[in-house]
Amino acid sequence: MRFIAMARGLLPWASLRKICGSHYYIQARLPCVRVKYLFFSWLAVFVGSWVIYVQYSTYTELCRAHDCKKIICDKYQKGIIDGSACSSLCDKDTLYFGKCLSNKPNNQVYRGVWDESQIVLKCRLEELFHFDLDSNMEPRKETVLFDKPTKGTSVEEFREMVYNLLKAKLGDQANLQELLKLVVTVADGNKDGHISLAEAKSSWALLQLNEFLITVILQDKEHTPKLLGFCGDLYVTEKVPYSYLYGLTIPWVLEFFIPSGLRRSMDQWFTPSWPRKAKIAIGLLEFVEDVFHGTFGNFLMCDLSANNIGYNTKHDLKMIDMRKVIPEVRFKQLIGARHCETDVDCVYGTDCRTTCHQSKKQCTTELDQPNLTKVCALLKDYLLNGAPSDVREELEKQLYSCIALRGTASQMEMEHSLILNNLKTLLWKKISHTKDS
């Protein structure tokens, strides 16, 4: 007691009291509730400041529209590059950048406006080093952009360059000449019937980008966004109104604080009605058909996530990101040359996996899952949640049969086609009489 009296004399602003049924301690005159209020207010300010700082730092790294435009327009004004979007971007200012959608610093993606039309701009900020298959970036051979073709190259020599590039990426397809004509038509940005050196430099740089080549190849397909123009290695496509399969996008900083179970529930809360989901799913199955033994070969979907799939106001599916849709021939070239210790080393993108040959320490080239299996795994929860009772059992059975597919599509082509057609038929019969069809 004597010690307590001395403490009270030394600290007249404090009192010794027992609160909340706990232990004795020295407390300031501010009530306990106010202390807690100040603490949580300080914590909220701290967390809020941290989130703002991280968001700002991320934004400045990922979103560099000014740099992109400056680099492109500088090359254009020097006469190095040209294309159908150059004048609007650099002279008329009728094409401009809007909301940033980038998720990689050197793959700039923005919403924008071009002559009052809503569009998407994609710009590649070139790095001065080589990206190989081990990175998340797509492979690039050129370390200097717009260096090819060189001055003095004839149109025929340029056509031969493009043909050899297409052959290297797609294999020796019987109709490569048809694709060459398509590429040359796209390269003629001002549609004057011939290709200038500046247009050829732009086209050559763009053809190094896997997504651009796939976009050109699939331009006549319903589920590919339309290519509207280009300038250098910047290109413009139509805007897809809904850029996430589930209809809800959350900033990645907030994703960090949301438990995975709650995130999955939130995804289901914000999906369209079931008939509309069925229509979107049919579109995705049709896209699998488009890339499976298509006009210019077979293509592999190596990054199949809800973030890469969108749809328009009519609920027609549109592919948002096709950077990891890769020709099977090119995939086998890349993965087959990779050294490995375990199967973990034999992955391209996030979804294309092969096995590691232990004696050779080299990746094999045969995929463990075809495109359809990965699509069905993505659609399982999407379609079964809210499915009508009269179709749910059969739908679940077909989805699980699809997910059980193994081996390459070429080894099970008939079974692959049968499952795909059965799924499309089941979904279409259920919604064909509704307004959503």
Image (tube, grey):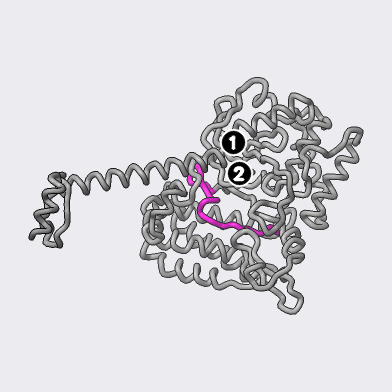
Q: Nearer the viewer, residue 11 or 416?
A: 11
The image quadrant of residue 5 is: bottom left
Residue under the point 72% across and 34% down: 232
Counting residues from the start of the chain, the first of labels 2 and 1 encountered is 1
Determine whether, in the image, residue 200 is placed left or right of residue 92.
Answer: right
State the image quarter where residue 333 is shown. Answer: bottom right
Q: Position of residue 72 (x, y in %)?
A: 69, 31
* Mark 2 residue crowding within 10 angstroms, few (<14) / some (14–19) / many (20+): some
* 344 over 8 or under it: above or below: below
Label 1: which secondary element: loop
Asked if the residue under mark 1 is in contact with the one under mark 2, i.e. CB atoms within 8 Å, the reply is yes
For label 2, the residue is: 105
Magenta stretch: give its range.
298-317
Q: How many marks?
A: 2
Residue type at mark 1: give it: Arg
Residue that carries the numbered disc 1 in the rendered image: 64
Residue at 59% across, 36% down: 64
The N terminus sits in image quarter: bottom left
Q: Which percent across, then down, holds residue 131?
A: 71, 52
Residue 387 appearing in the image: no
**Which residue is pictured at 53% across the width and 32% down the height?**
98
* Residue 378 image position (x, y, % from top left): 51, 61
